[in-house]
Structure formats: structure tokens, C-alpha cells
Image (spheres, rainbow, N blue to C red):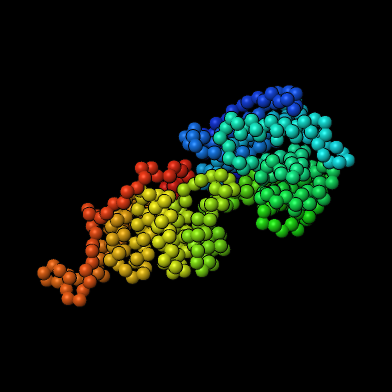
């Protein structure tokens, strides 16, 4: 109940967290032989980053699902837990279209009459319209409640489903779907995210079939299917929606989120090597799955740094420094990582040079110029003392010492990667 109240609060406070553009549009549909109103929510950064593309979230029952989904996404984006998406809500309640839009044959369970027309409208007219007029990534999601949730599952009956992620909240299943849908989930080869939910206060005749569908879907074991079922306690048919939305979004975009304590302890810390490879692969998956090319978050660099130190895999600092140079070329992060490598390997002379080189660059996160000088000064104390004439004593190695005024500065690109993700300072405010 506490989670539900907090969720309602942040929905009501949506304006605090987001400057989303909300556009009401009308499509003249040949499939429906009528005009259909849609509501489009553009991400806050849509105008600021003209080259960025965004996933599509199509909402059936857009009349009442648009605002709670937009609130959850705005809040998640503010904390850099969820990406920005283009939200498209389909109006279905103004002229009571909801039931006729989702008409299915009682025997076959397939779209019929107006339902067949609406099915084609979504896949053949609405999605192409959004793709033509807005900057969209290939990743597409669809969501609905009860009647519309059952209807959206019909796209999974196609050999190549239109959507990549399905949010089916308390679905009213067409005939035979609890047996047929698990077969389809098992047969489809493309990567899919599938979420469904119910509650102990849900409509009983619907709930029994949902539970049967979950039992069958749970037996499917394949890497390309990301399946989740939530059965909420103490929730009704309608209140389960406010529980389902964040759960579904966090399931779909779990890989997008910054490295958490759980991810670190369960997946990264136990590794014996390949910590930097893990980080690279994480962001490659984000780009491949959602067509989102992000600079690696500073907190994620810190997590890999902690794993390297914990497991004494100091050679990996070199690879981490290369990654830092690529993502934050003007910052001191890369030289700082190199400094740590040399310091831990006992080459204090090279460590001093790296820290003083870092001094010349821009501060980032909690890395400051004062910190670099302090580290360099502390390590200088362990370097060989110079002789009376100012030169190294006998048998003492020459240490080529850099200073803040003469340390080499590498040529870097003029622009650092653009990112709208909150900094640590922003999160702490």
C-alpha cells in the first residue's frame, strides 16, 4: 500500500520531474473508415537532441493509461533508471469504441469485424505514421488492461510480431489463449519481453485463466524470452494497474539501469576477470536492444573500478582508462585510472605522472584537481631522494617527474558525449 501511495504522489507531481511535450493528433484511418484521435507524448530531450531516436510505447486505453505511464517514465528518467520513450495513447472511450475495437470470434479467438480492422489499423497505419513523423528507434512496446490486454496478445500469433515488448495487465483472454499463447511464446525466435499481472482482488473468471497461462508460460526456458508475472496481494482489478506499470517498465529496461548493489554483488564481484568487458557488453546490449547509444555512466565506471580493486586485477585499469578516454575525453577520469594502476603495481613514479596529468584535465564527479595533487604529493615521498648536487645519488634511478605546469596534455575531441542523465550532484540535491 505504501508503494501505491508513493506512486500516486509522483504521478500527481509529474510536472516537477518532466517537461514532456503532449500532442493531440487525429489520424484518418482507411482501415477503420473513420478518424481516430491519438495522444503523443514526446520526451523532454526530443528537441534538444535532434539526432536521438526513441523507443515507442503504444497504449491501448490511452484515455486513462497515458498519464500513469507518462508519470512512471518521467520519474524513472529523472533518476536515470528508465530511458525516454515516445508514448502514443489511442483514444477508445469517447464513443465507446473499446469493446468494438477488440471484437474477437467467440470460437476461434481471432480478431473479427471491427476488431480485425482495428488490429490492422494499429500495425499497418498507426505505427508507420509514428515512425514516419517522429524519430523512433526500432524497439516497440504495447500495453493494455483487461479487454485491450487480451487483444494485444493477438499480435503474438503472427510469425514476426510487430512489437518487442507486451504489457498485459489482467487480460481478458480470448478463447483458447491460455493454451495457444505459451506455444507461440515458445516458438517465436526474436527476443521478446512479456509481462502480465493479476491480483487476489481481480475478477475471478479472468484470474483463473491468467493463472493457467502463467503456469504454462513459466515452463518455457529460452534466452530470447524475458517473462514476468506479478500477482499482487491486496490489490483490486483497477488498483493493480498502478502496481503493474513500474514493475513492467523496470523488467523491460532492467539492463538500461545503472549498476546496482545487487548487480555488483551477484554478477560482477564473483568474476575472476573481464570486469571491463562486462561493462562494455552491458552498454552494447542497451544499444542493440533499444537503439540507445549512451556514454557510460560515471557510477558504472566506479563500480568496475571497485571490482578491479577488490579482486586485485590491476592490469584491467589500463583497459578501463581507454574506455574512459573514449567516453569522457576532456575529463581526468582516464589518467586517474592509470594512476591507480601504477600505484597498485608499485610504480609510484609513473603513478605521480598520471595523477599530475589528470590535474591538467577537467574535474568529473568526485574527482578534483586537489585530489590529484594530494595523491601525487603523497607518492612523491616514496620516490628516491636526490643527491647533494641536485642530481640522483649513485645507483639511484632517474625519475622523470611531471608538474602541473609542464605535464603533457593530449589532444581531445572538442565535444564530450551529450547526456541528459542526472549527475551524482543532481541526485543528492
Q: Is residue 47 above or below residue 339?
A: above
x, y percent for residue 390: 13, 67
x, y percent for residue 275: 49, 62
Q: How many marks?
A: 0
Q: Is residue 100 above or below residue 428?
A: above
Q: Nearer the viewer, residue 374 or 304?
A: 304
x, y percent for residue 91: 69, 30
Residue placed at 71% from the left, 25% from the top?
29
Q: Is residue 165 left or right of residue 329?
A: right
x, y percent for residue 193: 67, 49
Q: Residue furthest left?
A: 389
Q: Nearer the viewer, residue 285 or 18?
A: 285
Q: Is residue 417 left or right of residue 188?
A: left
- The answer, for residue 27, to whether it is visible in the render is yes
Residue placed at 54% from the left, 34% from the top?
20
Q: Residue furthest bottom?
A: 395
Residue placed at 82% from the left, 42% from the top?
174
Q: Quadrant of residue 132?
A: top right
Q: Is residue 252 above or below residue 388?
A: above
- The answer, for residue 241, to whether it is visible in the render is no
Residue placed at 47% from the left, 34% from the top?
48
Q: Quadrant of residue 102?
A: top right
Amino acid at each position: 500500500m505504501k508503494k501505491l501511495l508513493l506512486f500516486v504522489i509522483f504521478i500527481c507531481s509529474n510536472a516537477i520531474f518532466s517537461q514532456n511535450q503532449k500532442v493531440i493528433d487525429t489520424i484518418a484511418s482507411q482501415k477503420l473508415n473513420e478518424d481516430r484521435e491519438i495522444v503523443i507524448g514526446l520526451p523532454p530531450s526530443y528537441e534538444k537532441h535532434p539526432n536521438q531516436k526513441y523507443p515507442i510505447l503504444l497504449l491501448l486505453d490511452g484515455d486513462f493509461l497515458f498519464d500513469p505511464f507518462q508519470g512512471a517514465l518521467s520519474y524513472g528518467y529523472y533518476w536515470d533508471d528508465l530511458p525516454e520513450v515516445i508514448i502514443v495513447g489511442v483514444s477508445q472511450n469517447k464513443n465507446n469504441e473499446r469493446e468494438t475495437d477488440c471484437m474477437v470470434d467467440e470460437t476461434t479467438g481471432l480478431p473479427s469485424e471491427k476488431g480485425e480492422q482495428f488490429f490492422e489499423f494499429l500495425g499497418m497505419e498507426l505505427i508507420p505514421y509514428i515512425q514516419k513523423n517522429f524519430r523512433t528507434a526500432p524497439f516497440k512496446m504495447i500495453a493494455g488492461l483487461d479487454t485491450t490486454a487480451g487483444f494485444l496478445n493477438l499480435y503474438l500469433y503472427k510469425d514476426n510480431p510487430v512489437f518487442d515488448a507486451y504489457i498485459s495487465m489482467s487480460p481478458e483472454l480470448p478463447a483458447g489463449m491460455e493454451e495457444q499463447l505459451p506455444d507461440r511464446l515458445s516458438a517465436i525466435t526474436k527476443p521478446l519481453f512479456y509481462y502480465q499481472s493479476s491480483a487476489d482482488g481481480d475478477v475471478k473468471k479472468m484470474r483463473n485463466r491468467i493463472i493457467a497461462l502463467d503456469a504454462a508460460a513459466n515452463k518455457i526456458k529460452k534466452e530470447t524470452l524475458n517473462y514476468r508475472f506479478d500477482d499482487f496481494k491486496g490489490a483490486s482489478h483497477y488498483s493493480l494497474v498502478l502496481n503493474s506499470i513500474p514493475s513492467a517498465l523496470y523488467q523491460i529496461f532492467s539492463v538500461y539501469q545503472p549498476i546496482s548493489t545487487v548487480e555488483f554483488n551477484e554478477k560482477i564481484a564473483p568474476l575472476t576477470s573481464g570486469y571491463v568487458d562486462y561493462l562494455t557488453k552491458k552498454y552494447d546490449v542497451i544499444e542493440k536492444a533499444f537503439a540507445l547509444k549512451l556514454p557510460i555512466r560515471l557510477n558504472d565506471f566506479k563500480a568496475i573500478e571497485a571490482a578491479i580493486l577488490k579482486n586485485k586485477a590491476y592490469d584491467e585499469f589500463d583497459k578501463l582508462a581507454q574506455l574512459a578516454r573514449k567516453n569522457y575525453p576532456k575529463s581526468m577520469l582516464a589518467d586517474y585510472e592509470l594512476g591507480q594502476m601504477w600505484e597498485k603495481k608499485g610504480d609510484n613514479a609513473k603513478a605521480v605522472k598520471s595523477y599530475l596529468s589528470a590535474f591538467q584535465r577537467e574535474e568529473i564527479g568526485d574527482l578534483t584537481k586537489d585530489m590529484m595533487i594530494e595523491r601525487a604529493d603523497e607518492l612523491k615521498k616514496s620516490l628516491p631522494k636526490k643527491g647533494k648536487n641536485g642530481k640522483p645519488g649513485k645507483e639511484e634511478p632517474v625519475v622523470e617527474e611531471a608538474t602541473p605546469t609542464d605535464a603533457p596534455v593530449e589532444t581531445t575531441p572538442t565535444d564530450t558525449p551529450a547526456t541528459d542523465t542526472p549527475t551524482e550532484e543532481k541526485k543528492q540535491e
